[in-house]
Amino acid sequence: MKHASSRELFDYWNERRGPRLAPQRTDIEPGAIRGILADTFMLDACGPDHIVRLAGTRLCALFARELKGESFAGLWRTVDQASLAELLTVVVEEKLGVVASVTGATASDALLPVKLELVLLPLAHRADVNTHVLGSLAPLAAPYWLGAKAMGSLELGMFRHVGGWGDMDPPRFHAVPGRMRGGLIVYDGGLAE
């Protein structure tokens, strides 16, 4: 992860989940991440549009409007919306995080793209029918026009999954039966040789 907001959000999420795959929505305390709230958001991950439930001030400034209630998918280029939906499905169903490179630009500065970093982290749910995703979207360098112009559709770049068992602290990892091999957990059992 390149951006300090991404690293801090992931570290906080990782600490709050403990030995679980993901923390509960109620485990997240905004005051604990107040320094990065401007770059963070929360999505209601039910349905194809993934509605923005909360959005930080710097994130809203990038688009020069309040994002609460908007479709997260609507912020992306049409050609990237299916890939984004697939990523969000993995985040929600597999309880794996994603970090991705993103590019955006304003209509008047299309030749001066802004490089951003996206983090999507799952939140577990019990009786709550709404599944949430915690994330951050932060520019690697603040554009000169921040808050004065609106960024256009975002372009999804390279991504990788984070937050699997391999990202947990070793004491918690060793409590899980099995062993790591090639990034996967191998469980002993089955047929004997």
Image (tube, rainbow, N blue to C red):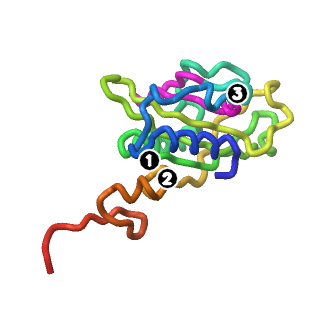
Residues tagged 2 and 3 counted as in contact (Cβ below 8 A): no
For badge 1, the amino acid type reads: Leu
What residue is drawn where x is 52% and y is 40%? 13
* Dot 2 crowding, Cα within 10 Å, few <14, some 14–19, many 20+: some
Question: Which image quadrant is residue 174 in?
Answer: bottom left
Asked whether 83 or 94 is in front, the reply is 94
What amino acid is found at the position of numbered circle 2 in the picture?
A: His
Which quarter of the picture shows residue 116?
Answer: top right
SS type, badge 1? loop
Q: Quadrant of the C terminus?
A: bottom left
The circle drawn on residue 63 is 3
Q: Which residues are magenta?
A: 35-54
- The answer for how far apart the CA atoms under marks 3 and 1 are is 27 Å
In the picture of the structure, the residue carrying the numbered disc 2 is 161
Q: State the residue position of label 1.
A: 96
Q: Position of residue 81 (x, y in %)?
A: 51, 39
Percent position of residue 142, x then y: 80, 38
**Depicted 32 relative to depicted 5: above or below:** above
Q: Position of residue 3 (x, y in %)?
A: 70, 46
